[in-house]
Amino acid sequence: MPETCLNLIGGAWVAGDHAVENRNPSDLADLIGLYAAGSAQDVARAVAAARAAQPLWAAAGPQARADLLERIARGIEARETAFATLLAREEGKILPEALAETRRAAQIFRFFAGEALRVTGDAVDSVRPGVEVTVTREPLGVIGLITPWNFPIAIPAWKLAPALAYGNAVVLKPADLVPGTVHLLVQVIQDAGCPPGLVNLVMGPGSIVGQALIEEPGIDGISFTGSVATGRRIARVAGARLLKVQLEMGGKNPMVVLDDADLDLAVAACLNGAFLSTGQRCTASSRLIVQGGIHDAFVAALGRQMQALRVGPALEPDSQIGPVASGPQLASNLDYVALAADEGCDVIGGGRLNGATEGFFQAPALFVNATNAMRVSRDEIFGPCAAVIRVRDFDEALAVANDTAFGLSAGICTGSLKHATAFRRGARAGMVMVNLPTAGVDYHVPFGGTKGSSYGAREQGRHAVEFYTTVKTAYSYAG
Ligand code: NAD
């Protein structure tokens, strides 16, 4: 049996309540490791450690923060192969995607190393003679970070880096499905010289560790990414406590394809947006809204290319799509494939696949002749499945695109500047893509959505300062 990977509390590696197996979804015989599952008491100890560390970090100043973040970025880069291999093994992303995600994490730490030096305020003339007014930003304090399984290093990075850059201490609770990558990240953070207690890691189930974290009196805010159901639960607790909260949740992202689109470009954008990373992206193109004139050619080309995608083990160089991340997620995906047929769609692909190893492999699926009222067009499936909805014209396409409970990313493929502009203005989504996949974003600009997809301040880029700081207005009179 391998040694158990421990939680980090107050700078010390400590055992949890019990240990949980982490297995490879490409090969269930591959035991990646045993990981400590913490308790509510561990969370309380971690928050106390963070409380003690935070004022010292706030006082350390921007240069110390920038230096630590830069060292963390270098530490990730130095171990990028180890990160990417572990990420591919535990989450199922193919190795090139896992490597890209690892590099993204390093870029995020480096970006916020710079931002740590750019915290500014305002000096304002008072309406009262002789009085000076300053508006400054201060750290929020101790922040609980709760992350999902689908980006095991990028999402923890885009919460940790701004939290530290702006002078906060954190307790990080990663998804129970993928503790390994975060555990390695926290080791790198320790090796980079992070002060004890500034970054605490408590792994374990959401119902115990996550719940304890949101209820812990010693925290000043929660940054959460995950499903709408969990986000709502956190919002209720946070609302009752008047706790600052930031929620990034699901999507049912539309990709509109107009008759005047470049067919090859549209097919490539949809293939990428719907199926890469096994469709397990909050920004995945899960509703393809296609105008009548291009519809049949588009479906024929996309169906052909989708069926040619090679599904296989994440570490196999030939694989283009890895496995679904877990057994329950695969079962849910297969239920939606069956539902699509029941609801009247023509289903292409979508079946369970057997490989040389026992894993959660699924063929990508297109649900042709879907309507936007069907459940397969309304629920976030979070797998390699996309519904194709036929529309008459641009106006109907935009109306269908906006007819959803979500509002994360929305895309259009068109050669028309008029329609591209009207879509950019009219799409009710936090991110709009023109002739680009709905998934795939930059790290130096805000990320987030509208409606049921997001709640609270935006993540990433300079906008991250809004959540991770609080504003103080000071008046002084010299006499
Ligand atoms: P999830 O909601 O099941 O879990 C997310 C995290 O919340 C996990 O760490 C989990 O342990 C924790 N949690 C569960 N119950 C909790 C509770 N009662 N209190 C506190 N924490 C609790 O989501 P998931 O299945 O890990 O991730 C998939 C979801 O994440 C999808 O809906 C996807 O769209 C979304 N997602 C959104 C974004 C975004 O930025 N908008 C990015 C990636 C993923």
Image (cartoon, grey):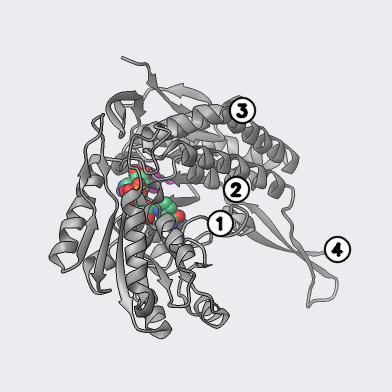
Mark nearer the N terminus (1 vs 4): 1
Whole-percent x, y for residue 226 in the image: 38, 52
Q: Nearer the viewer, mark 2 or mark 4?
A: 2
Element assignment for label 4: loop
- Kindly identify which residue carries mark 1: 467
Residue type marked 2 = Pro
* Label at residue 408: none
Q: Which of the image's four quarters has the C terminus? A: bottom right
Mark nearer the N terminus (2 vs 4): 2
* Label at residue 478: 4
* 3D distance between C-alphas at marks 2 and 4: 35 Å
Q: Nearer the viewer, mark 1 or mark 3?
A: 3
In front of the other: 409 or 235? 409
Picture residue at 56% right of the left edge, 47% below the top = 141
In front of the other: 68 or 437? 437
In front of the other: 99 or 466? 99
What segment carries the magenta color? 213-217
Mark nearer the N terminus (2 vs 3): 3
Q: Residues within 10 Å of mark 4 (few under 14, many from 20)?
A: few
* 3D distance between C-alphas at marks 1 and 4: 33 Å
Whole-percent x, y for residue 399 in the image: 38, 81
Mark nearer the N terminus (1 vs 2): 2
- Kindly identify which residue carries mark 3: 78
- Kindly identify which residue carries mark 2: 162
- Is there a contact, CB below 8 Å, between mark 1 and mark 2? yes
Q: Is residue 214 magenta?
A: yes
